[in-house]
Amino acid sequence: MDNKLLEILACPICKSPLIYAKNAQELICKADKLAFPVRDDIPVMLEDEARTLSSEEIDKL
């Protein structure tokens, strides 16, 4: 994931900054507890495509 792209991306729901989880290929929004997938280096910033994170997953960040 390009660092410049990561700097300008924000959660489409709450506009919070995102964290890139390289191993999982996901962009994480801690505020909404959502993980948006990154497919072929393209972030999929759709609420319907995001998965909900558990409290344990959030605590690990």
Image (cartoon, helix red, strand yellow):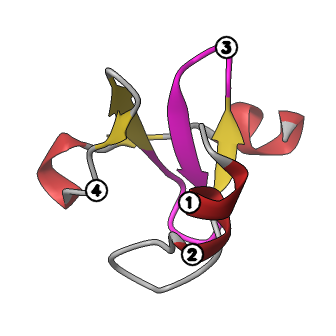
Q: Amino acid at mark 4?
A: Met
Q: Amino acid at mark 3?
A: Asn
Disc on the earlier residue, 1 or 4: 1
Image depth: mark 2 or mark 3 in front? 2
Image depth: mark 2 or mark 4 in front? 2
Disc on the earlier residue, 2 or 3: 2
Q: x%, y% of residue 9? A: 51, 69
Asked where in the image residue 41 lies, by quadrant, the reply is top left
Where is mark 1, residue-wise?
Answer: 5
Give the SS element for disc 3.
Answer: loop
Residue at 34 percent of width and 79 percent of height: 13
Q: Is residue 12 left or right of residue 16?
A: left
In the rendered image, residue 29 lying in the magenta stretch gets the answer yes
Are the residues flagged by discs 2 and 4 in contact, CB closer than 8 Å?
no
Disc on the earlier residue, 3 or 1: 1
Where is mark 4, residue-wise?
Answer: 45
